[in-house]
Amino acid sequence: MIEFKGSKERDDYAQLGTKHPKLLDLLIDLAECVELMFKKPIVLTSVHRSQDEQDALYAAGGNKAPKSAHTTWEAVDLRDKIYTAHEIKFIEGYLNTKYKNDNKKPVCFNHTISGNVNHFHVYLQR
């Protein structure tokens, strides 16, 4: 099951089929796996961001915004607070084993953002 932080994330997700079909397939695969293994959904908290949205997000934390794969429809963020530490490690391992990027960057990692909030960053090159 796939859930959404809000309507923007739902609307952006609906566009993934044309913007980045392989990323859409990855999310469907992950949702099915997590449902089967843990009886939990995945929750999309960010899909696409414009550069202005990216700049505003980082400015709030007093930082300069890095270039983001969110602006090119190559990344999504997923909520992690609904998972145990074991489940988080499983999800990272599952995605990083099954999917690969040509540039060797990890497909999935869990990290902390401003406000001391953790989430999964899922990145898949075209």
Image (cartoon, rainbow, N blue to C red):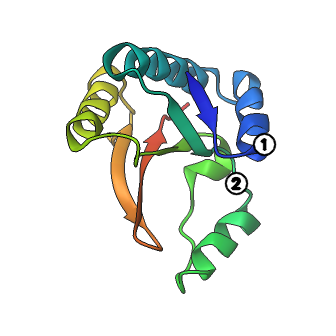
Extreme residue in the bottom direction: 62
Q: Is residue 30 above or below residue 117?
A: above
Q: Please report the residue visible at 70 percent of the width from the left and 54 percent of the height from the top.
A: 49
- The three-letter amino acid code for the residue at tag 1 is Ser
Q: Is residue 52 left or right of residue 36?
A: right
- The three-letter amino acid code for the residue at tag 2 is Arg
Select label 2 or label 1 by which is in front: 1
Extreme residue in the left direction: 86
**Residue 90's disc number:** none
Q: Please report the residue visible at 40 percent of the width from the left and 49 percent of the height from the top.
A: 81
Task: Rate crowding at label 1 as few (under 14), some (14 to 19) or many (20 or more) other CA atoms within 10 Å.
Answer: few
Q: Is residue 15 visible?
A: yes
Write down the residue under mark 1. Answer: 7
Location of residue 52 in the rendering, given as x and y in whole percent from the top left corner: 75, 68
Regarding mark 2 in the picture, which secondary structure is present there? Answer: loop
Q: Is residue 71 above or below residue 106?
A: below
Regarding mark 1 in the picture, which secondary structure is present there? Answer: helix
On-image quarter of the N terminus: top right
On-image quarter of the C terminus: top right
Write down the residue under mark 2. Answer: 49
Q: Please report the residue visible at 62 percent of the width from the left and 81 percent of the height from the top.
A: 59
Foreground pick, 10 / 84: 84
**The image quarter in which residue 38 lies:** top left
Q: Is residue 64 above or below residue 50?
A: below
Location of residue 69 in the rendering, given as x and y in whole percent from the top left corner: 57, 49
Point out the tag, 2 or 1, that comes first from the N-terminus: 1
**The image quarter in which residue 85 lies:** top left
